[in-house]
Amino acid sequence: MHASRSRKDLEELMLTKLKEERVKLERFLGVLGTLGNISPFIGLFGTVVGIIKAFRDLAASGTGGPSVVARGIAEALVATAAGLLVAIPASILYNYFMRRLKVITVDMEIASARLLVMLGTK
């Protein structure tokens, strides 16, 4: 459709289309990256709350012993595990899709350059 345009115009059209497609491909990567980054902090927050609860229960009971703090510590460890359960797959998927995006972008750049050569524009 634009084959009669100058090489400079075609390069600019291809570059803008490449950027447009890249934005479409990156659409949900921010959410995935954010999940991978903040999930450990949410787990850590749950851990701190659980430990605080364990010490509060210990203080309220008046007598020390593992059974008094075990429940609070168990809750704390569940929060930590939940944070990691979300963060690890989110980080793996984010890195995988970022790599795929890079490969796709390079493939588009190569195809654009080859098309310009085949069109033989000046």
Image: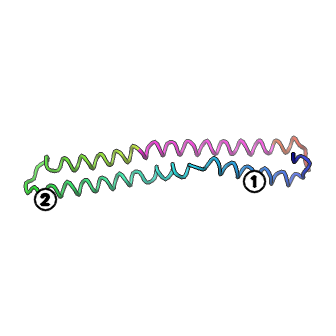
Q: Position of residue 113 (x, y in %)?
A: 80, 45
> Could you say which disc has been placed on residue 121 in the image?
none
20 horizontally vs 82: left or right? right
Where is 67 relative to 48, above or below?
A: above
51 horizontally vs 92: left or right? left
Q: Position of residue 72 (x, y in %)?
A: 21, 50
Provide the major secondary structure of the magenta segment.
helix
Instruction: Say what amino acid the circle numbered 1 marks.
Output: Thr
Which residues lie in the magenta part? 86-113
Is residue 101 on the magenta stretch? yes
First reached walking from the N terminus: tag 1 or tag 2:
1
Q: Residue furthest left?
A: 63
Quadrant that contains the N terminus: top right
Instruction: Say what amino acid the circle numbered 2 marks.
Output: Ala
Is residue 78 on the magenta stretch? no
> Could you say which disc has been placed on residue 59 in the image?
2
At horizontal 18% and vertical 47% (from top left) the residue drawn is: 70
Considering the numbered disc 2 on the image, is that residue within a helix, a strand or a loop?
A: helix
Mark 1: few/some/many CA within 10 Å (<14, 14-19, 20+): few
At horizontal 82% and vertical 52% (from top left) the residue drawn is: 11
Quadrant in which residue 38 is drawn: bottom left
Q: Position of residue 80 (x, y in %)?
A: 33, 48
> Could you say which disc has been placed on residue 16 in the image?
1
Q: Position of residue 35 (x, y in %)?
A: 46, 50
